[in-house]
Amino acid sequence: MHVVLDETAMTAAGQGNILASRLIHRAHAEPGWFLYAPTCALVEADRARPGTAEHLAALTGITVLDLDLPAVLAVAREKTWAAAHSRHAAQPTADRPGGAVIATTAPKRWAGEPVRVLDLSP
């Protein structure tokens, strides 16, 4: 299971959201569970809740995704960097042929987007 955390999910994890905490635990403890934190979303989460980026980057079950050239090109076309980088990270790759699910506490924001969503709303 491949899951991309958007900035709302990252912020929620730092505020005690039980569903976000369970995802983090699974990625740490269970084989086959992978969590990704796109850097642009990590920046926005840290702006909303200072300390979030440092905390999440320290967790062994989370892979921080760099802003490589394909991500830059995807982000450059969009209005919000966090959403664009999250959407780009959820697209199929050689490592993730089925793509990834975006975990969010704002599922309506992803309506009409070509991504699968995991609602972490309380």
Image (spheres, rainbow, N blue to C red):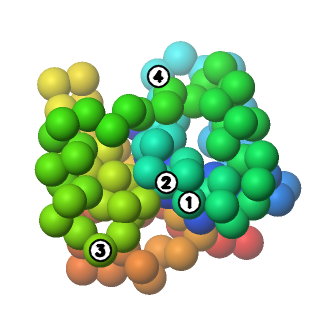
Q: Position of residue 70 (x, y in %)?
A: 16, 40
Q: Are marks 2 and 1 in contact (CB under 8 Å)?
A: yes
What residue did someone put label 1 on?
44
Q: CA distance from mark 3 to mark 1?
A: 13 Å
User: Compared with residue 2, is residue 15 higher up or lower down, i.e. above or below?
Assistant: below
The residue tagged 4 is 32
Are the residues flagged by discs 3 and 4 in contact, CB closer than 8 Å? no
Q: Is residue 71 visible?
A: yes
Which amino acid type is shown beneath numbered disc 2? Ala
SS for tag 3?
loop
Residue on which the image places disc 2:
41
Among the two numbered marks 3 and 4 on one chain, the one whose residue lies closer to the N terminus: 4
CA distance separating discs 3 and 4: 33 Å
Separation of residues labelled 4 and 1 (CA atoms): 28 Å
Q: With 72 as the anchor, is 4 left or right in this view?
A: right
Q: On the image, which quarter does residue 120 sit in?
A: bottom right
